[in-house]
Image (cartoon, rainbow, N blue to C red):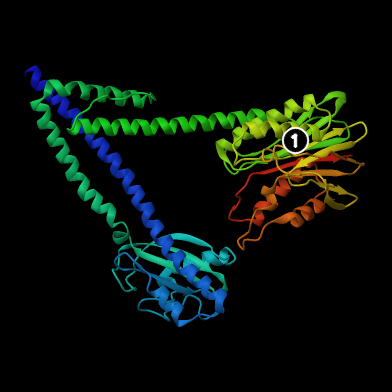
Amino acid sequence: MSLKLKLIILIICEIVSTVALVGFLSYRESKWKIKELARELLVSKTEQAFALCDHHYKNSLEVSAELKQEIADIGIAADGYVTVINNEDGLNKGVLIIHPTDVGKSLYNDDFQHIKDVLDEIDLNDGVMGYSNLIYYHQGTNAKGRQGEKKIGYFKYFAPWHWVILATGYEKDVFASRDQLRATLIPLVVLVMLAGSVVVYLTIGQMFRPIQRLTESTKEVAKGNWDISIDYKSNDEIGALAQSFDKMVQSLRENARMWHEFNVARDMQAQMLPDTYPEIEGIQISAKSVPTTEVGGDFYDFLQLQDGRLGIVVGDVSGHGVAAAMVMTAALGAVRFAAEEKECTHEVLNMVNFRLNKDIQNHMFVALFYGILDPKTRKLYYTNAGQTMPFLLRDGEIDFLPQAEKTDRFPLGIVKATVYEQLSIELQPGDMLIHYTDGIVDVMNGSHETYGFDRLAESIRQNASLPPSELIDKLIAEMKQYSPDSNIEDDVTLVILKFE
């Protein structure tokens, strides 16, 4: 066998394997995206019907024939539709309220186990308004339509009328684009491989180098080398493959860069936050920060100052993620520096505010509470810059710390000329100081009601006998219990000092 033939066979094999791999990965990625779009289609149809119900309910509180027709007119793919099922306890539970053909039919039985499971699932979740989920099932032999075929559905519960709104369709119809993609992609891949083989045979010398580079580059990428690139300009299949490879590597390189920045910010944040608490005789101290993402915007710190005094820092950066973590690092560093330069809390925040106005972006800011505790006199000096005001529990009564009335309370980084004021309070035996960020009071339940200051204060009062660390865990647990769907949209931070 000649060297030329060997090279042709080798390069054709390279082309076949590479094109097949790229085609497979492209199909798998497109298949996943099509599935997501199909699910989003069902969700959007359900949400459309849910919005119609909500609109009619707010305007008239009653179900109208017009509403039923509007929902019945919502179509999905070829044979899909939106149906409404009664979930009110009694003889009408499971009865079809809206359906293309079977209005009035009861589905709350073993012949329609998937519907029975949906109603039981909603009841198990206490009939929460807006409860939703995806379901998969086969069209039963006791139902009309294409019996035995797989179906996919999405339901959402409209509690005021006890309606289960269900958008459903056949997988074959909903995922039709996936099958069309496969039917198109396979011949396309085969065509590219044949064309590549012909081109290789005719131009073996010219095309061997880029193919070899592509092979080597693929191996480098597999090793984690994202800086590789194939500089090959051509209008043939190999040129297109090289360009696709470069775009793929560029995307991988960007993702790797973002993950690197994310990990750096997370490590930086972990290093900035204290992992131990000051040990002061007669004072129990504990703290915890729970970010909504792995990198949050909340922070706290304890600063050992001159004469045994303790600096207490609790802050909240606007936003989340890497940007918030970077601003948090800058803010905490500025506070630590200013605390060494200035004696009074308002002077520290004036200095930090001036620094942050120069360093951070215009759309970001930092809400921050800074206090200085003298353990000898148990006197707390403090200044608040837009942070939620701490609670003071004393003799079984709980209230906010007094706050400045005549001077500014803007968060840091908004107005450069802000002037802050220092306040003070003497802490007594049995007092407890509770710092918290707005994440805990802004948590919502299924009815879109916030947890609020009153619930937090009452929970603190009822559990005041617990040590600070256990009290923090208790408060976070009750917050999560209030929002069973984990609808937590902001970081949560708690810092508690208990005076014996």
255 shown above or below 217: below
Q: Is residue 263 left or right of residue 357?
A: left
Picture coordinates of residue 465, whole percent (x, y): 83, 47
Nearer the observer, 441 or 417: 417
482 shown above or below 213: below
Nearer the observer, 144 or 280: 280
Residue 352 lies in quadrant: top right
Q: Is residue 178 left or right of residue 166?
A: left
Picture coordinates of residue 59, whole percent (x, y): 55, 76
Which residue is drawn at the image coordinates 45% and 66% (left, top)? 48
The quarter of the image holding the N terminus is top left
Q: Is residue 202 left or right of residue 238?
A: left
Residue 451 lies in quadrant: bottom right
Which residue is drawn at the image coordinates 79% and 30% (left, top)? 278
Q: Amino acid at mark 1?
A: Val
Q: Residues within 10 Å of mark 1 (few under 14, many from 20)?
A: many
Q: Is residue 472 visible?
A: yes
Which residue is drawn at the image coordinates 30% and 63% (left, top)? 149
Query: Judging from the image, what secondary structure is the residue with disc 1 in?
Result: strand
35 shown above or below 330: below
The residue at which mark 1 appears reads as 313
